[in-house]
Amino acid sequence: MSEESKPGGFVEQVIYVPGRLWARVEDICERSAKEPSEVIAEALRLMLSGGVPTAPAAVDGTTRDTEPTASNEVSLLAVDASSTEKLLALLVDEPLESSELRESLEEIMTSAEEGRSQFERHSVTVAELARKMSEAHGMSASETTCVEIAALVHDIGKLRVPGSVLDKRGKLTPEEWSLVKQYPEFGAEILAGFPSFADVAQLVRSHQERWNGSGYPDGLTGEDIPLGAQIIGICDVYNVPTSERAYRPALSPEIARRTIETGEDGLWQPELGRVLLDQVLQD
C-alpha cells in the first residue's frame, strides 16, 4: 500500500470503515457541523495508543490490499487491530439499547473476524445464544441487552494477540498460551474507555471464568462470577466445537452438546447447561 509523506511527518494512508460506522460519522457531522476528518480525528484521539494504522494483515502475516465493496465499506482508513479499537470511539455516546450500536458492533466484529476461520461469525452466534439464554433465565430487558452486547464483543481482546499465535496449527508453547489467556483482560481494557460499557467490560473480563475456579484471568469461583459472564462462557464453549479451527475441522452439534453435558461437573452451574440444551437449543 502506498504511503505519501506530508509536512510535519504525517503519513497519508487508506483505511476501510464499515458502512454503518460511516453513517454514524455522517450523522455526527450533520449535528455538529464538523467535517468527517474532524470526527474521525476526535475519535482516534479518544483511544489513541500510538503508531500509525496500517493495512490489515493476512493470516500469513503479509499485508492485504483488498478493495471495499460499495454496499458495506467506505474507503477511508485501513482497519487493523489498533484502528479497529479506535473506531469504537465513534460509538461512545450510544446507549446499550441502541439498535445502531448493536449493528455497528456486529459489523466491526464481523470485519475483524473476516478470513479467520476460528473467529468468523463466532461473535454474532454467541451473542444470539446469550440473548436467548438470558431471556430463558428470566433476566430483565436491560440485563439481557448488556449480556448480548458483551457476548458480541467477548473476543475483542484477541485483536491484541498476534495472528501467528491465534492461527497456530500446532500446540501452543507455555508463553503463547499465557498470552492467549490474557485476551479477556485485553478486551476489558479496550472497553474501559467507554463509561456506558462498564458492565459490558466486566462480563467480557470474566467470561472465561469457571464455576470450580479453573478459569481465567482471575480464578473466580461460583457466585463470584457474574451470571452474564457465565452465560457468555457456556455459549462460547458450545459454539467452539461447531466452528472450524486452524487445527481441526468443525465438529457436529451433537459433540457440542456432549461438551456442555460433560462440563456440568464443575465448569458451570448445571442449571445453565439445562437452560441451553433444553430450552435455547430446542427453539
Image (spheres, helix red, strand yellow):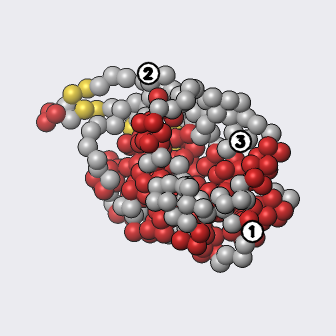
Q: Amino acid at mark 3?
A: Pro
Quarter of the image with the C terminus in it: bottom right
User: Mark 2 or mark 1, which is nearer to you?
Assistant: 1
Q: Amino acid at mark 2?
A: Thr
Q: Where does residue 228 sit, x and y in percent of width and height? A: 60, 67
Quarter of the image with the N terminus in it: top left
- Helix, strand or loop under label 3: loop
Q: Earlier in the sequence, mark 2 or mark 3?
A: 2
- 230 above or below 185? below
Around disc 2, counting alpha carbons within 10 Å, would you say few (fewer than 14), some (14 to 19), or many (20 or more)? few
Q: Residue at x 69, y 39 (%)?
A: 243
Q: CA distance from mark 2 to mark 1?
A: 46 Å
Q: Do the numbered discs 2 and 1 sit on residues whose CB atoms are within 8 Å?
A: no
User: Which residue is situated farthest in the left direction here?
Assistant: 8
Residue 220, which numbered label?
Answer: none
Q: Earlier in the sequence, mark 2 or mark 1?
A: 2
Q: CA distance from mark 1 to mark 3?
A: 21 Å
Q: CA distance from mark 2 to mark 3?
A: 29 Å
Side (left or right) of 231 relative to 105: right
- 154 above or below 201? above
Residue 271, which numbered label?
Answer: 1
Q: Nearer the viewer, residue 166 or 195?
A: 166
Q: Where does residue 175 sit, x and y in percent of width and height? A: 41, 36
Q: Do the numbered discs 1 and 3 sit on residues whose CB atoms are within 8 Å?
A: no
The residue indicated by pointer 3 is: 241
The residue indicated by pointer 2 is: 62
Report if residue 279 is visible in the image. Answer: yes
